[in-house]
Structures are given as C-alpha cells and as structure tokens.
Image (cartoon, rainbow, N blue to C red):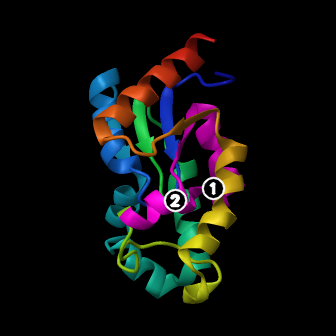
Amino acid sequence: MAGSSKGNIVLIGMPGAGKSTLGVVLAKIMNYDFIDADLVIQQQCDKTLQRLIDTCGPEGFLEVENQVLKDMDYERTIISTGGSAVYSEEAMRHLGDIGCVVYLQIGYDALCERLSDFSERGVVMRDGMGMSLLDLYEERRPLYERYAEVVVDVNGLTITEAARKAASAIEAALEG
C-alpha cells in the first residue's frame, strides 16, 4: 500500500453500493474504527446532504465535501465516502495518502434495485436533475476505477459476504 502510514481503509463507490452499511461490518471484522464522511459533513454543516445540495448547489456541496475529506486525519479507520468524493482530485489524493482506497463495484442493474428512489439520498448531480442514474453511473465509474487500489465486486452478495470479501482483498493488498 504505497505511502499509507495511517493504515485507513477508504471506501468509494456509487450511492447504494453499500459503503456505509458494509463499512460498519468491515470495521467489526477488521477491528477498525468507522467514520461516515457524509455524516461528518451533515454534522459540520447542520443540514442533511440533500438540503446542503439544495442550498449550495452541486458545486458548492462538492467544495464542502472536498474540504471535509482533505481534513480527515484518522488511524486504523474505515472511512466511508460519499459517492461524489471522486470528483475532487485533491481529496482523493489525501485519502490515498492516509489509506488504501477500495472501490465497491456494483452493476447498474443491481444499483437500480437498491436505489428505487434516490432523490432523497443527497446524490450530487453535476448536470442538475436532468441526469439519469445511468448517466451518473457512466460518469463516475472511470473515476472510481482510477483512484481504487483494490476493487471488490459486491454484486449479488449480502452485506456480510461483501464485507468478508472486502476484508480478504484488503488484507491481500496490504501484504502484497
């Protein structure tokens, strides 16, 4: 794991891929702490993600998210990022410096099943609400792949199965 002195695990992926729920289980399996970046943003701004996006606009929200992410300083922590974290090269570089970046990969069809209504989730649409889930998926997938040190395919797995698979992949990457 190049350059990571803090030993964190940073989860990236689409909204609905399971970063938050899987992150909690993964933290238990690996005996790490857990932090959800979206909740940190909500606490610091005293607004839900959706209200923040509505108030600041997508670009304003991304600035807030970037600042929160690049200020993160944890050790032995699973960090669940928001799906839009990959829009900030600065934040992703910092997260890569403090941890192993793990992409929770999910197929588009599985994503649709999990996200029947994603309008209340606080999902950043850079092009506004005219963007479909497929547009968002196609826009973000190459970014997740670019930043990931480890890719874990979570399609068709329960949260526990996916967390075990992630733990094995992470341990293999840390040893390699």
Disc 2 target residue: 83
Above or below, 56 relative to 63:
below
Q: In x, y percent, where is residue 142?
A: 71, 54
Above or below, 62 relative to 93:
below
Q: In x, y percent, where is residue 136?
A: 60, 70
Above or below, 77 relative to 62:
above
Q: Main secondary structure of the magenta part?
A: helix
Q: Amino acid at mark 1?
A: Val
The reply to whether the C-beta atoms of the residues labelled 2 and 1 are less than 8 Å apart is: yes
Q: Secondary structure at mark 2?
A: helix
Q: Which residues are magenta?
A: 84-113
Seen at 61% across and 25% down, the residue is 4
Give yes or no for residue 111 being in the magenta stretch: yes
Left or right, 166 with respect to 25, comes to right
Which numbered marker is on residue 98? none
Seen at 36% across and 62% down, the residue is 114
Which numbered marker is on residue 86? 1
Seen at 57% across and 77% down, the residue is 125
User: CA–CA distance between discs 2 and 1?
Assistant: 7 Å
